[in-house]
Image (cartoon, rainbow, N blue to C red):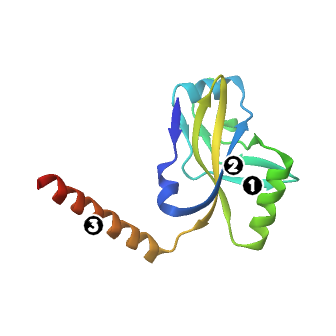
Amino acid sequence: MHIENRKVRFEYEFLDTLEVGIELTGGEAKSFYEGRVILSGSYVKILSGELYLVNAKFTWPTVPATSESRSRRLLAKKQEIRNWAQRMSEKKLTIVPVSMYTRGRFIKLKIALSRSQLEFDKRARAKKRVMQRENEQDVRIK
């Protein structure tokens, strides 16, 4: 199973990525395997030296509505957490979830230390993508 947060690639510029584990209950794990997880609008916070996933929605009939968007603890090494916390305090950075997938029997979350993109950067990237697509089409026609 693989769940992607596609919106985040347009909104943020990734500086560094990290693969972490995630603590889930049984109903939340079932909802992941059924593909009923929404990562858009979620982010990662560092609280008392631990990473927490905030605002991720796990929708499943067995998951109570109150715990649908609860904070979930992420499993990472303390040194990695300290390193990212220091980088976040130096610059205006955010940690966002990129994708959620399985590795063996474990559910993993790929998170990224990122910087928010400005509006004109987004437009420039869109123009560049359109130009590249047109060039590829021209090459295929010839």
* Percent coordinates x, y for residue 2 in the rendering: 52, 34
Tell me the residue at 87%/52% (across/down). Answer: 49
Q: Of label 1 and label 2, which has the lower sequence position?
A: 1
Quarter of the figure with the C terminus: bottom left
Q: For label 2, count other residues whose C-alpha is less than 10 Å away and answer few (under 14), some (14-19) or many (20+).
A: some
Q: Is residue 16 visible?
A: yes
Which circle, 2 or 3, is nearer the viewer?
A: 3
Tell me the residue at 60%/29% (across/down). Answer: 102
Are the residues flagged by discs 1 and 2 in contact, CB closer than 8 Å? yes
Look at mark 2 in the image and give the residue it sits on.
Answer: 54
Q: Amino acid at mark 3?
A: Met
Look at mark 1 in the image and give the residue it sits on.
Answer: 45
Which circle, 3 or 1, is nearer the viewer?
A: 3
Q: In the picture shown, does residue 67 fall above or below 82?
A: above
Q: Quadrant of residue 13?
A: bottom right
Judge by depth and name the residue closer to the eye, 19 or 139.
139
Which residue is outermost to the right?
48
Q: Of label 2 and label 3, which has the lower sequence position?
A: 2
Q: Which mark is residue 131?
A: 3
Work out how far the residue at label 2 is from the one at label 3, CA to CA, in angstroms. 37 Å
Judge by depth and name the residue closer to the eye, 62 or 142.
142
Q: How many marks?
A: 3
